[in-house]
Image (cartoon, rainbow, N blue to C red):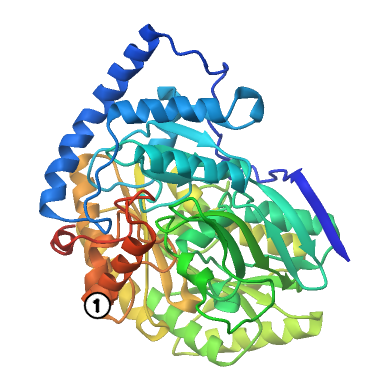
């Protein structure tokens, strides 16, 4: 049976410990009349806000050509006329917001979770479309006036993906495009708009009594469009893989020229031509704007949670290799180092866990007996003398399992809340699983030698780990910056990647030549130039300039 819930908005249901982003909205209707006086005032404001950007762009374009062959963007006057046309196109009663207030633009143009060099700029205007047709109209206006476009949704990106450009431009906020359009229970798939949050999708399936779920699980406020665009994964990747593992069956995409394409049909597999869906997975909004997605769903199986403790991260991660090679029913294996455990313990009246490096296991199986068998095998492995795992604790029931897993999911927020006013730089790398013990150990040693407070949490079942580095001033920020640089170089030297799931954005693009090689990077740039010759879509992200290979 096809269940259609067209135009039904999803309801956000997040745990209290998780902070939900508030979407900026102007409290008064925008003015639609443009008198000579307010036109002149607006022109002056836009000229002032973009002049420095144009100077910086002029200087940089002579030293490092962009994938768009140094395109010429519109003038401040062009941008002003574009805003007027946007307001004429989307009247106040259309439901599409056209925002130009500094307070609203500040939310869209900056981020409190990335710490890369360079000023954070405001977009010239923010528009909140509701349909694919709305996005097409925005893109055509952007082409007419040569305005860059940056897409915004959940606002959870960590590598500067939604930073505005120094030239200004249009921020397209697709967060309001959050509808589930179709649920196909028999086919285990679902069609939705890009602003739909994966948490809400899973809650909707649960509320409807459907034993299905979407297994990719990054930040709890992440949206489907952003997850696709950044090539996300999460704690479930050890069992279900990443965004590049056929979880996105197709996408409706608005190209930089305003053309709309659908990457493929809804069949589970297809060998008809290029896999265009994957062209946009990980492209970070530089090739197209996602407006609809068909996602594949997985059966929701019973799970339970267990924890065990180790004397150091090398032994913990070494134990993981043997657990995985035994083929037991594992959905997640997560590492929290002793620093994160200390932060978790501080959130309880009395310490909950021993102050040691700890593995959290989420076991999965169709029956209670299969779960018990998997738990028994894992316990036997981690308690071997080579690994020295202790304190094995298996959840007694579903309520305790949920509480234990929430400790893992809340680790980042807990560490930040106990940081004494520190700010946190979160980053990730990924290596072959066999190389993970050495990488984590050397990274922890490097961080401690630098005197920086930190914590390491890892999706160790697939070789991916995250470091949260805390700092209080500019001097410590520079130390952290160097630590991140060395961590990335260490990972690439071990045949790994500069990012397992956060994406490239601004923060990691300097490493792509080292990781992928010049030929692969230049091919990416060639595709970008072919699809977006005016370099309108998310300029300055993903594609490294030659000079970026020497900076950090």
Place of residue 499 in the rendered image (x, y in percent of width and height, measured from the top left) = 37, 66
Q: Secondary structure at mark 1?
A: helix
- Locate the N terminus and report the quarter of the image it occupies: bottom right
Foreground of the two, 490 or 382: 490
Q: Determine which residue is flagged by label 1.
A: 519
| Residue at 55 percent of width and 73 percent of height | 237
| Picture coordinates of residue 546, whole percent (x, y) | 16, 63
Q: Is residue 445 visible from the viewing direction of this image?
A: no
Task: In the rendered view, tell whether residue 479 sits above or below residue 22.
Answer: below
Query: Is residue 143 left or right of 266 when viewed as pictured?
Result: left
Number of numbered markers: 1
Q: In the displayed structure, would residue 499 be above or below residue 196?
A: below
**Furthest residue in direction right, as rendered:** 1
Q: Quadrant of the C terminus?
A: bottom left
Give the residue at the far front of this rendering.
Answer: 144
- Residue 435 percent location from the top left of the image: 35, 83
Please tell me whether residue 179 is drawn above or below residue 370 in the rendered image: above
Q: Residue at x 45, y 13 (%)?
A: 34
| Position of residue 147 in the picture relative to residue 188 (left or right) | left
Q: Position of residue 273 (x, y in %)?
A: 53, 81
Outermost residue, top side: 37
Residue 313 located left or right of residue 401: left
Task: Say if residue 259 shows up in the picture.
Answer: yes
Residue that lies at the very extreme toward the bottom in this rendered image: 326
Q: Nearer the viewer, residue 433 or 77?
A: 77
How crowded is the residue under tag 1: few (<14 C-alpha within 10 Å), some, or many (20+)? few
- The residue that appears at 78% across and 80% down in the rendered structure is 366
């Amino acid at each position: 049976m096809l269940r259609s819930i067209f135009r039904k908005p999803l309801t956000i249901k997040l745990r209290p410990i998780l902070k939900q982003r508030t979407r900026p909205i102007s409290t008064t209707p925008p003015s639609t009349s443009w008198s000579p006086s307010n036109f002149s005032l607006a022109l002056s404001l836009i000229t002032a806000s973009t002049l420095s950007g144009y100077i910086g762009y002029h200087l940089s374009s002579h030293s490092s050509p962009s994938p768009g062959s140094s395109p010429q963007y519109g003038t401040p006057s062009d941008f002003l006329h574009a805003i007027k046309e946007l307001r004429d196109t989307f009247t106040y009663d259309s439901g599409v917001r056209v925002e130009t207030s500094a307070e609203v633009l500040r939310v869209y143009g900056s981020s409190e979770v990335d710490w890369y060099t360079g000023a954070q700029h405001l977009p010239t205007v923010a528009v909140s479309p509701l349909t694919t047709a709305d996005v097409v109209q925005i893109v055509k206006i952007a082409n007419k006036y040569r305005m860059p476009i940056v897409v915004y949704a959940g606002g959870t990106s960590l590598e500067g993906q939604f930073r505005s450009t120094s030239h200004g431009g249009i921020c397209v906020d697709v967060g309001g495009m959050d509808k589930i359009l179709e649920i196909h229970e028999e086919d285990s798939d679902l069609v939705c708009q890009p602003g739909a949050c994966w948490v809400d999708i899973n809650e909707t399936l649960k509320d409807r009594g459907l034993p299905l779920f979407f297994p990719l699980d990054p930040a709890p406020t992440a949206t489907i469009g952003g997850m696709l665009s950044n090539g996300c994964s999460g704690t479930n990747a050890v069992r279900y893989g990443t965004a590049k593992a056929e979880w996105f069956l197709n996408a409706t995409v608005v190209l930089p020229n305003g053309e709309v394409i659908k990457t493929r049909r809804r069949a589970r597999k297809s060998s008809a031509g290029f896999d265009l869906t994957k062209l946009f997975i990980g492209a970070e909004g530089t090739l197209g704007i996602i407006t609809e997605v068909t996602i594949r769903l997985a059966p929701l199986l019973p799970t339970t949670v267990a924890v065990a403790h180790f004397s150091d991260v090398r032994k913990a991660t070494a134990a993981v290799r043997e657990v995985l090679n035994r083929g037991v029913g594992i959905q997640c294996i997560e590492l929290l180092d002793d620093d994160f455990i200390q932060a978790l313990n501080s959130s309880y009246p009395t310490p909950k866990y021993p102050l040691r490096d700890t593995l959290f296991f989420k076991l999965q199986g169709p029956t209670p007996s299969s779960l018990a068998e998997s738990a028994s095998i894992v316990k036997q492995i981690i308690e071997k003398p080579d690994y020295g795992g202790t304190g094995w604790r298996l959840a007694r029931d579903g309520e305790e399992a949920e509480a234990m897993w929430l400790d893992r999911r809340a680790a980042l927020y807990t560490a930040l809340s106990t940081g004494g006013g520190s700010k946190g730089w979160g980053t990730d790398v990924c290596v072959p699983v066999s190389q993970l013990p050495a990488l984590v150990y050397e990274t922890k040693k490097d961080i401690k030698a630098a005197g920086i407070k930190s914590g390491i949490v890892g999706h160790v079942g697939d070789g991916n780990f995250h470091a949260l580095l805390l700092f209080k001033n500019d001097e410590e920020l520079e130390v952290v910056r160097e630590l991140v640089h060395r961590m990335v170089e260490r990972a690439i030297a071990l045949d790994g990647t500069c990012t397992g799931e956060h994406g490239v954005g601004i923060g990691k693009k300097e490493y792509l030549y080292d990781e992928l090689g010049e030929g692969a990077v230049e091919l990416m740039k060639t595709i970008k130039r072919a699809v977006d010759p005016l370099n309108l879509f998310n300029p300055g992200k993903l594609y490294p300039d030659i000079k970026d290979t020497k900076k950090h």
